[in-house]
Image (cartoon, rainbow, N blue to C red):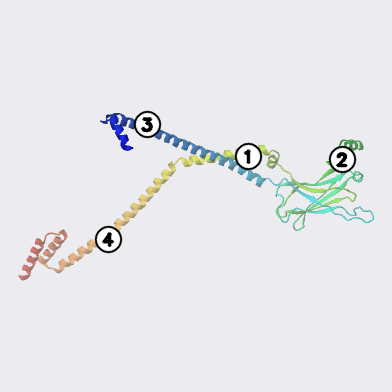
Amino acid sequence: MNFLLRFIVFCFDPLGLGRRFLVRPALNVGWNVYDRVRSKADEKVGTVRELVLRLGLIAFAVVLIIWLAVFMYAAFYYIYMPAISHTRPVHMQFKTCLETSTPCTFPHAHVSLTKKQQLLMVGQAYKVIVNIDMPESPQNLELGMFMVCAEMRDYDSMLRGHSCRSAMMRYRSPLIRMISTWALSPLYVLGWKEEFQQVPVEIFSRYLEERQHPITDVYVEIQSQKIQFYTVTLHIVADFTGLRYIMFNWPVLSAIVAISTNLFFILVVFLLSWYHWSDASWLHSLQIKYARLTNTLQSGAGSVILSSTSMSSLRDDDLLSLDEKSDIADVGGGDADDLMVEKSLDKHSLGRDAKDALRQRKTKRTDQ
């Protein structure tokens, strides 16, 4: 197949002029155009990747800053804001008279709030409310006023607060009761509504918790033997003031303001940090100072080494000169001169002829 292709090309262009002057230049131009287009495409891809990376980093930084601002507000809200209310059921107890089947003692109950733990926040004022669900029975309508008392005790059964408040049912005339009964009779028949009133009795208006003596138990007593009720509940509600009042009553507005403030300060810190780290002049100056310090240390170490080597070389030269002087002192007159010449010849490594001539001169002197 390759031979056939070459034969066809030879038939069309036997001298090779078309391939040399037409095909090869066209192929070179095509390859150059292809290389340029490919390089431009690679550059565009590189720029697109860099743009996507930068956008991704910016989006990550924005999400991180927003999440950090929201997290800071949520953590502050959780730490600063106490629980809004604590509700406990109150199970009343009393002794029954055998003759009349009515209570012989006042209804009373013991409510356990916690076990040696801090249920209420220290420094926060609370309202202690006893809610009594009383049916609109003739006995309750004739009851009139009655007293409700409560005692607050800690885990050592020490009395930390005592209060008694009066209460009674809301008065409604017989005509109003009849109209409301006829109007709500379908709901009463279906069981969707009952004929009772909820009587709230505020025992403590602003009760403050103590850190050393946290409240763990509450004792409730209704000072009436003729009262009739369905259920009794104890509510401890936080009485917010100041910033807590704003955060509780306007949560959306306070959250927007707090998160915006956090965003502002976080952005300021982030921009200052970015400006500080992007300006590398201080880092360059620090590197220059470090290089100067290392150079001075190296030069100092080098000078110390040179001084030590020079001192050792001087000591060696002194020892050598002392040895030579001792040798010269042992030999007298011309022998000393000959020894000095021999030493100089040995140092300068002259030829053997000069050394032989010197030795012959020595022997002649000894013969004489």
Identify which amino acid the numbered label 1 is placed on. Answer: Ala
Give 321 or 50, whichever is nearer the viewer.
50
CA separation, marks 3 and 2? 93 Å
- Badge 4 density bin: few <14, some 14–19, many ≥20, Cα 10 Å: few
Q: In which quarter of the image is residue 317?
A: bottom left
Q: Quadrant of residue 349?
A: bottom left
**Nearer the viewer's eye, disc 2 or disc 1?**
2
CA separation, marks 2 and 1? 51 Å
Identify which amino acid the numbered label 2 is placed on. Answer: Val
Dot 3 or dot 2: first in sequence order is 3
Q: Which residue is drawn at 83% across and 43% down?
A: 198
CA separation, marks 1 and 3? 60 Å
Residue 199 in the image: x percent, y percent?
A: 83, 44
Residue named by callout 2: 189
Residue named by callout 4: 312
Q: Which residue is drawn at 22% across and 64% down?
A: 319
Q: Is residue 180 visible to us here?
A: yes
Residue 172 disc label:
none
Q: How many numbered discs?
A: 4
Residue named by callout 3: 33
Dot 3 or dot 4: first in sequence order is 3
Q: Do tag 1 and tag 3 residues touch (Cβ < 8 Å)?
A: no
Helix, strand or loop under label 3: helix
Helix, strand or loop under label 2: helix
Residue 304 in the image: x percent, y percent?
A: 32, 56
- Badge 2 density bin: few <14, some 14–19, many ≥20, Cα 10 Å: few
